[in-house]
Amino acid sequence: MVLKNAKAKEVLIEWGLLSITSFFFYDVVWIITSDWALSALGDCLFFIADFLYCACLSGLIIWTSASIVRLNYFSQTSYKRQLLLSITILFCNVAIAIISENLYDLLVPAPYDSFEEGLLIVCFIATFSSLAHSTQYYSRLISMQGEQNLATRKKILKMQLDPHFVFNSLNNLAGIIHENPDDAETFTIRLSRIYRYIIRSIEHDLVSIHDSLKFASDYVALLDIRFPERIILQTDPCLERIEDEGIPTLSLQLLIENAVKHNMPEDKGKLSISIFRQGNYLIVRNSLRHPGNKNSIPSFGIGLDNLYERYRVQCEQVPTIRKTDTFYEVQLPLIRIKNEALTDYRG
């Protein structure tokens, strides 16, 4: 209902502006240049009739243009369709202007020979309005298609996360079954709870920092079944107070998964993961172990690439990677949340 009211208001404003512009060229210009027009200023009825005529003509032109652009044939953005639409609107509106001017001249004869001038003016008005309508329509259509393409790209990127998570979780489960079959049931139950949240949240572009941290904590607890007491997660308590900023969905899960994949802790080793804020970035830092990790988890290899692409389409920024001899760090740009309905994580 609100959208309909806004659209109606937009049309009324357009009608009013075109009516005033038409009247300006149809009469006001001639008042300045014509001796008769200056002497006829006292005849208000004549100018009222001209204004009503301009308003009716403007309304008819707007209605005709809107009716033409609603045709399914012109719903494509090809060059030929755009050219044909412009020609069709122009032809119809000029024809309407010529017919209207002839009828108006019969109903309200001008006291001086002004038919040719009036016809020229209404044809100019029709031409200007036609070009404006066709340009506005295709600009709006291109914008809508751009938004649809962006939404489709986001959806494809998020769809990659589902098999990526399942694939890596099944690899962890296989390792648990091989090493400690008794823990496999516990792992499966916790995995099902986390996966339910993933299904609910994957439709959203962003997730709050609060929910991200809760999910990261539960995900590390899940991995702890596979690597008991070997993954240490540290988070800055100040992050809980961030309310109007977020990150792409499942970002922390991807980074934690990546840290474990490349730095799988050995029997006596520890993997430390720290999450804190630094300026406008959320920092995810993990300790590094020596190369030669023969127990690395196989992967699709799309985790970080997926995260980069989702950032590009969401805010035109990308994460920054910093690596030293002792740690590997990913800096995630914080994105302001604009009234987006976020899924609460209940674990």
Image (spheres, rainbow, N blue to C red):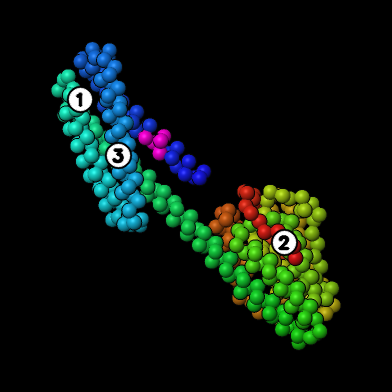
Question: 317 or 249: which is nearer to us?
Answer: 249
User: Disc 2 or 1, which lies upstream in sequence?
Assistant: 1
> Mark 2 near mark 1, Cβ–Cβ under 8 Å?
no
Density class for disc 3 (Cα within 10 Å; few <14, some 14-19, many ≥20) is: many
Determine whether 37 is above or below 6 in the image.
Answer: above
Q: Nearer the viewer, mark 2 or mark 1?
A: 1
> Label 1: which residue?
108
Residue at image coords 38%, 32%: 16
Density class for disc 2 (Cα within 10 Å; few <14, some 14-19, many ≥20) is: some
User: Disc 3 or 2, which lies upstream in sequence?
Assistant: 3
- SS of the residue at dot 1? loop
- The stretch of residues the image draws in magenta is 11-15
> Mark 1 near mark 3, Cβ–Cβ under 8 Å?
no
Q: Position of residue 85 (x, y in %)?
A: 29, 50
Q: Is residue 67 visible?
A: yes
Residue at image coords 37%, 35%: 15
By secondary structure, the bulk of the magenta-drawn segment is best described as helix
Q: At label 1, which amino acid type do we have?
A: Val
Residue at image coords 57%, 56%: 314
- The quadrant holding residue 100 is top left
The label shown at residue 181 is: none
Q: At label 2, which amino acid type do we have?
A: Tyr
> Label 3: which residue?
61
Relative horizontal placement of residue 177, taking residue 159 as reference (left or right): right
Q: Position of residue 256 (x, y in %)?
A: 72, 68
Q: Is residue 320 visible?
A: no
Residue at image coords 31%, 44%: 65
> Label 2: which residue?
345
